[in-house]
Amino acid sequence: QVQLVESGGGLVQPGGSLRLSCAASGSIFSLYDMGWYRQAPGKQRELVARVTRGGSTNYADSVKGRFTISRDNAKNTVLVQMNSLKFEDTAVYYCFADVRTSPSSRRDYWGQGTQVTVSS
């Protein structure tokens, strides 16, 4: 099995910053894309940012220029630095990882979610 443990959520004022981190552990044969989705109340889960094993990144238009995703392949961790936070960034943020656990088994794994609240 694979576990993803997230940390770093919390309450922040508009314009503030937070950094979320996620560490993957367990039966990891190969680790492919990692990243973050978020889900606000009453809305569908949406991609925030993802990063490939080689470091290529993809961002939602709504966070471009404000969020920066990075990963440490040696530690199986992914971070997202969130700056200039807005009210609409309030959501539960979920870490995900595309993991191969054996030559014949590969799927996405998810963290438990961490709450980010932007409020004055």
Image (cartoon, grey):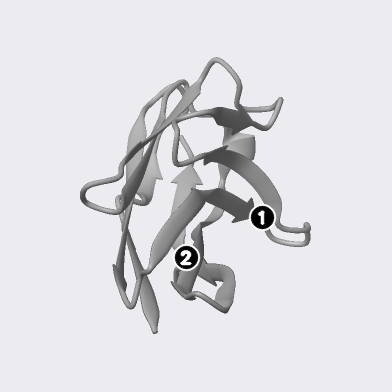
Q: Position of residue 111 (x, y in %)?
A: 45, 68
Q: Which residue is mark 2?
A: 113
Q: Which class describes the residues within 10 Å of circle 1: few (<14), some (14-19), or many (20+)?
A: some
Residue found farthest to the top: 65
The image quarter in which residue 19 lies: top left
Q: Residues within 10 Å of mark 2 (few under 14, many from 20)?
A: many
In the image, residue 112 sits, relative to residue 82, either above or below, namely below
Q: How many marks?
A: 2
Looking at this view, name the residue that lies furthest to the left. Answer: 75
In terms of secondary structure, where does tag 1 sit?
Answer: loop
Measured from the top left, where is residue 47 in percent x and y? 66, 46
**Image quadrant occupied by the N terminus:** bottom left
Question: Residue, x 33% and y 78% (percent of image)?
Answer: 27
Q: CA distance from mark 1 to mark 2?
A: 12 Å
* Local secondary structure at mark 2: loop
Label 2 near label 1: C-beta < 8 Å?
Answer: no
Q: Which mark is residue 19?
A: none
Residue at 46% in and 35% down: 120
> Hey, what amino acid is under mark 1?
Ala
Identified by mark 2, the residue type is Gly
- In the figure, 3 relative to 81: above or below? below
Question: Percent position (x, y) of residue 113?
Answer: 47, 65
For mark 1, what is the residue? Answer: 40
**Disc nearer the start of the sequence (1/2):** 1
Q: Judge depth for marks 1 and 2 and give the one in front.
A: 2
Seen at 36% across and 51% down, the residue is: 9
| Residue at the extreme front of the image, as rendered | 103
Relative to 11, 86 lies left or right: right
Q: Position of residue 33 (x, y in %)?
A: 52, 49
Observer-nearest residue: 30 or 4? 30
Is 73 in front, or is 12? 73
Q: Is residue 67 left or right of residue 7?
A: right
